[in-house]
Image (cartoon, rainbow, N blue to C red):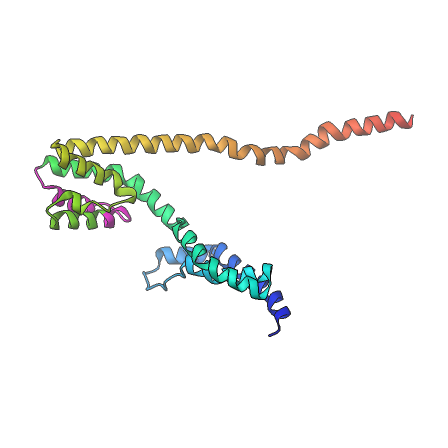
Amino acid sequence: MTPSVLMAVTPAVLMAVSVWFAVPPAAHRRAHSLWAPARPTRASPDPGWLAAACTPVAVVLFLGWPVGLVVGLIAAPVVRSAVGRLETGAARRRNLVARRQLPGALDLVTAALDAGRPPGTALALAAEVTADPLGSDLSSVAHRVSVAGDLNAALSDVDGPLLPLARALRRADQSGVPVADVITSAALDVRREDQAARRQQARQVGVRTAAPLGICFMPAFLLIGIVPTIIAVASNLRL
């Protein structure tokens, strides 16, 4: 394949791959995957490696063959690292669902602690009745807490939606405050933050819909306000 043909075909291939990743599957396929029995799925390609593989090709198209290849190979690891740090849409949705499940799960943990159960057992009981994705995360944390003797060591690398719970457990372990009281306070804080985030989203709806509504009303404004004025002026000039 000659370089000219390669330069002509590569943008089309990259555009097709981008469209394939961007367009969601059909509605009946999503419904089938929702109700059909679970099947083993293939691992999706890593976006970081995909971006790193496309970087040299894109740079060669812009800078030419020898220089573009060198610059692209140097930039590929940087692109992979930058894309790898980005949060995917699936991870964002998973964290959002888990964040909304967290206050109820913390209430269950508090109830188990008030009944006299240790923190590891309380977390395991809450994980059993909490749906995924938070249920699996709680189960993992409960296992680590029950195995490790030190809460700080067991919760040192916990992040994401369970970060408020980890902070509450570490604070209770360091200060000597009853764990149930600290987790109750953490649940209240999470609920306040969630309510504040929802109010912020509700305020942003008006701002985001202003431009589309303006575009929708623009033709009517032109036809009712501007066009009759122009017609009237043109008629007076003819007279």
Left/right of residue 136 with respect to residue 31 in the rendered view: left
The answer to whether one can see residue 123 in this image is no
Q: Quadrant of the C terminus?
A: top right
Q: Is residue 138 above or below residue 40?
A: above
Q: Nearer the viewer, residue 164 or 118?
A: 164
Taking the spot 61% from the left edge, 66% from the top edge, the residue there is 7
Residue 125 is a magenta residue: yes
Judged by its main secondary structure, the magenta piece is helix
Left/right of residue 127 with respect to residue 234 in the rendered view: left
Q: Quadrant of the N terminus?
A: bottom right
> Residue 61, percent across and down?
59, 61
Q: Is residue 183 above or below residue 65?
A: above
Which residue of the protein is positioned furthest toward the left in this rendering? 116
> Residue 123, percent across and down?
17, 44
Taking the spot 11% from the left edge, 32% from the top edge, the residue there is 176
The answer to whether one can see residue 197 in this image is yes
Left/right of residue 2 with respect to residue 87 in the rendered view: right
Which span of residues is magenta-colored?
A: 116-137
Taking the spot 72% from the left edge, 32% from the top edge, the residue there is 223
Residue 209 is a magenta residue: no
Q: Quadrant of residue 49?
A: bottom left
Which residue of the protein is positioned furthest toward the right in this rendering? 239
